[in-house]
Image (cartoon, rainbow, N blue to C red):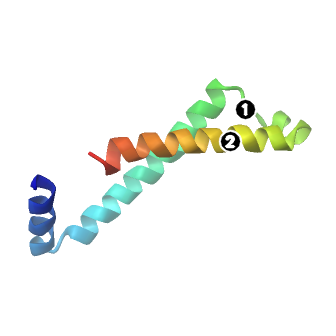
Amino acid sequence: EHKQLLHTKLMINGTLYTHLAEINQQAEEMFSELVNQMKSREGIIEQLKAENQLEWVRRMNNIRHRVTEIVYQELIYT
């Protein structure tokens, strides 16, 4: 109910689209930063991409999936 009230208030004020654009920007920045951090922490480097592209893709997809869940939990579902 609180989210509905916030949504109505933002729409009335004409700021809903601005608010959504800000959330989208935050999500994109958070996603990029977290992917880079996880790549570094897990040792996913360009050499792996050159030597074993399938493994690189598998590991990157795994990271992207985990990061997507984090971003949704932190920005979208709250």
Q: Where is residue 76 in the image (x, y as percent from the top left)?
A: 33, 51
Q: Position of residue 22 (x, y in %)?
A: 32, 59
Mark 1–mark 2 Cα distance, whole angstroms, equals: 8 Å
Picture layout, residue 67 above or below residue 25: above
Q: Residue at x 41, y 51 (%)?
A: 27
Q: Residue at x 10, y 72 (%)?
A: 13
Q: In which quarter of the image is the N terminus?
A: bottom left
Q: On the image, which quarter does residue 52 sit in?
A: top right
Q: Do the residues labelled 1 and 2 touch (CB within 8 Å)?
A: yes
Q: In which quarter of the image is the C terminus?
A: top left
Instruction: Count residues near mark 2 (Cα–Cα under 10 Å), then give few for <14, some for 14-19, many for 20+.
Output: some
Ranked by sequence position, the earlier of labels 1 and 2 is 1
Q: Is mark 1 on a helix, strand or loop?
A: loop
Q: Which residue is drawn at 56% across and 44% down?
A: 65
Q: On the image, which quarter does residue 25 sit in?
A: bottom left
Q: What element carries label 2?
A: helix
Query: In this rendering, would 4 be left or right of 60?
Result: left
Picture layout, residue 53 above or below residue 23: above
- The amino acid beneath tag 2 is Met
Mark 1 or 2: in front is 2
Query: In this rendering, would 13 be left or right of 18?
Result: left
- Of all residues, the one furthest to the front in this rendering is 1
Q: Name the residue under label 2.
A: 60
Q: Name the residue under label 1.
A: 44
* Image mark for residue 61: none
Q: On the image, which quarter does residue 9 sit in?
A: bottom left
Observer-nearest of 16 and 77: 77
